[in-house]
Image (tube, rainbow, N blue to C red):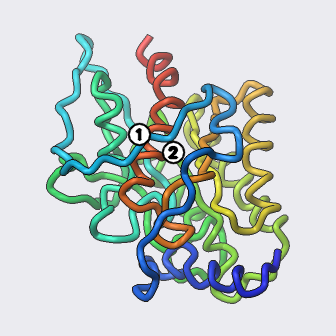
Amino acid sequence: MRRGVATLAVVGLLLSGCGGQPAESVAPGQTDASSPSAEETVGLSSTTVPTAASSKTPTKSPSPVVPPNGRKIKVMVLGDSISAGAKDEVMNGYRLDLLKKLPAYAIDYVGSDERGDSRLADKDMQAEGGACIHATPCNSTSMYEQTAGWVSAAQPDVVIMQGGGNDYCCGRGDQPDAVVIQAMTDWINLVFQTKPGVYIVVIGMTDYHDGYKNWIPTYVKSQAQAGKRIAYVSFDGISTYDTVHPNIAGYQQLAGRIATVVKPIFDKILR
């Protein structure tokens, strides 16, 4: 969907400008995070309120409380720069804040990539700036082709996935939303086919290409109602540097929303 100058600005910034880092000329700022305009979650969870930013220096990730049976919960963070963290100061993405919000659970992040600073002991993930779901050419990884291998190798209990923005960029901005919708549908189905019984949490889209953005929660809700182990986390109102990439406060907000969704999932896994 075209939006004139505003849309062109977002295309230039979207998901690391198809290259992994947001434009340096954009001054850090925040979007309005006071009241998300869309339902926070559907499927396996209830609504949660975004977490306020903290001015304190973050501490190291807490030591998880491992249950008596030693069961850890394997979580794969799968996506593009929104999941990976586009700037060095947010290279932990939401992973460190998620550990802080769920200290009672032994979370084992899994994936073939590593990213994070000294505060995050477990740096494993499967996210990369500029990554596409299923687009050729892609300035970074086209994730669909490799997802089955990643999931088979890591055997996650929960996959937190997001993507699609980079499928529009790099000369493909005018393609129909239906192309990216089909890519996400196929991607979700591929994860379920590769690891039956896995739980999927889908993070929504920023205000970019409304047809695709609005389709995601509707599709996830329909799949959850059909009995699939899938849930949705809204991206609406997340605090960002550039309308796309979360800043420090934004990742704290996103971690709070994800925590509300995955806590009941973790409890089901540990039963």
| Residue 264 as seen in the image, left or right of residue 206 | left
Residue at the spot of label 2: 160
Q: Amino acid at mark 2?
A: Ile
- Disc 1 to disc 2: CB gap under 8 Å: yes
* Residue at point 70%, 38% (across, down): 39
Which residue: 41% across, 73% down?
28
Secondary structure under the numbered disc 1 in the rendered image:
strand
Q: Distance from label 1 to label 2 (Cα)?
A: 7 Å
Q: Residue at x 49, y 58 (%)?
A: 239
Q: Which mark is residue 75?
A: 1
Q: Nearer the viewer, residue 34 or 164?
A: 34
- Image quarter of the C terminus: top left
Compare residues 111 and 65 and report the one nearer the observer: 65
Residue pictured at 25% horizontal, 59% vertical: 116
Which of disc 2 and disc 1 is earlier in sequence?
Answer: 1
**Residue 110 image offset from top left, x and y in percent:** 35, 46
* Callout 2 secondary element: strand
Q: Is residue 202 above or below residue 103?
A: below
Q: Position of residue 130 (x, y in %)?
A: 51, 74
